[in-house]
Image (cartoon, grey):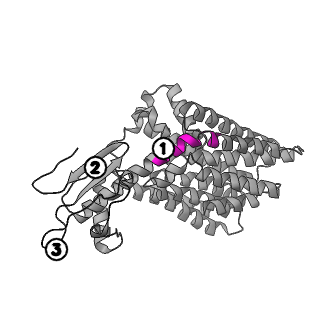
Amino acid sequence: MLVLLLYGLVRATPDLQRFDHAFLTFLFSWLLWSPLTWYFHTWSITLERLIPEAALLGGAWLSLGRLGLMRKAAGFAALAAAGQYSFPGGIVLWPLLGLLFLREAIQQRAFLALLAYSVSFALSTILFFTGYQHPPHHQPLSAIFEQSPAQIVSFFLIVLGLPFADGPYVAAFLGGANLCLYALGIRRVWRCKQNDAVSWAWTVIGGYALSQALLATVGRLPMGMGHALRPDYITYGIYLLIAGSVLMRRALLASGADRSSHLVLIAGGATLGMAFLHAPSALKQMHARYHRLRADISCLQLMLAFPGERCPIAFYPDPELVLSRARSAHALGVLQFPPVTVIARTDDSLGFVDHHEPSPEGGPLQTPSFLLKTGGTDYQRSCRREKLGRT
């Protein structure tokens, strides 16, 4: 959906050629699935993170349509609410989509539609924060004022450069370069008097990346600089690069630069090169992550089959939360694992069940044992009630 929406926006942008349509769409898709971003798609909250991005691109597409302003207000409100309630960071969609709506509403003096959108924003936000519980492991937002300006800028740029490098220094450099490309594109578009609805939509798309990086900086920097490399922030910088490339491309075409597509090629080639450069280390991390994930799945399977038994498990955000939901889904028949009684010994390096022993009466299993190998650590357990050993 994200790729199709992006392609539609690129096609709707005047002056861009077929090469630009194909290359920008390919670049966007590649960055979403590169060796550097693979881990994001195994993160347990991937879907919630992607819904605000789909709402953003959908809102940009809606702003270019010919619907009436009241219908647009309803559409923007629905998209913003979907992003807000799927993940807290999606609340920035209300002001961002409001900028798309505000420009047209003022031009047409549609103040009633603007009022309806503003009231929807206020009501939705009040409802969202009613009974809201601040995560206990988060620092208060005011803690950002205790950080140095250098740390704030570094954290912010690293988040913007995450899709292009797996090291903090290179990521910060590329994040700053993409920020300069975006700012220069906006400046050139305004100088060329191309500040139409299309350029405004791309400006808002790039602004989404900046707003999310800023929120991540305020919320996570007090917890340590290492949080800048979290996988759940890895898609934000993609929108900044694409928006900056589109804006600069339009501006250069308007100024008569026949070879302006070279800029897009350079920007895209640099990101592809960085992704290939870091591919070996990323694939190594993927392999280790796969081992840990298979071990966690085996743990979950045995804990469902034998209630009360424990197992080393590392599901995010809380193993107990995951286990309780898995038990509910398992009882309803939504989550089904292969029966423990038919699992044979397989490649134990991937964390599968080693073997089991049925009870003498032929009833439910009472004494299963298994071998898990996760990150170089072996866990061997016996689930006898009176004997519990670990090596």
- Element at label 2: loop
What amino acid type should be assigned to the residue bearing mark 3? Gly
Q: Is residue 119 visible?
A: no
Tag on residue 285? 1
Question: What is the CA distance from the residue labelled 1 to the residue labelled 2?
Answer: 20 Å
Is 141 located above or below residue 115 in the figure?
A: above
> What percent of the width, then of the height, locates residue 340?
28, 67
Could you tell me how many numbered marks the image carries? 3
Name the residue that disc number 3 marks.
Answer: 362
Find residue 14 and report its image quarter: bottom right
In the image, the segment drawn in magenta is 274-287
Q: Nearer the viewer, residue 74 or 253?
A: 253
Sequence-wise first label, 3 or 1: 1
Sequence-wise first label, 1 or 2: 1
- Relative to 193, is 87 on the left or the right? left
Sequence-wise first label, 3 or 2: 2
Q: Is residue 253 visible?
A: yes
Q: Nearer the viewer, residue 239 or 231?
A: 231
- Relative to 253, is 369 on the left or the right? left
> What percent of the width, then of the height, locates residue 329?
32, 68
Q: Nearer the viewer, residue 309 or 328?
A: 309
- Residue at image x 41%, y 38%? 141
Is 118 located above or below residue 138 in the figure?
A: below
Asked if residue 122 is among those painted magenta in the image, a careful observer would answer: no
- Residue at image x 26%, y 56%? 370
Find residue 223 and report its image quarter: top left
Tag on residue 312? 2
What amino acid type should be assigned to the residue bearing mark 1? Gln
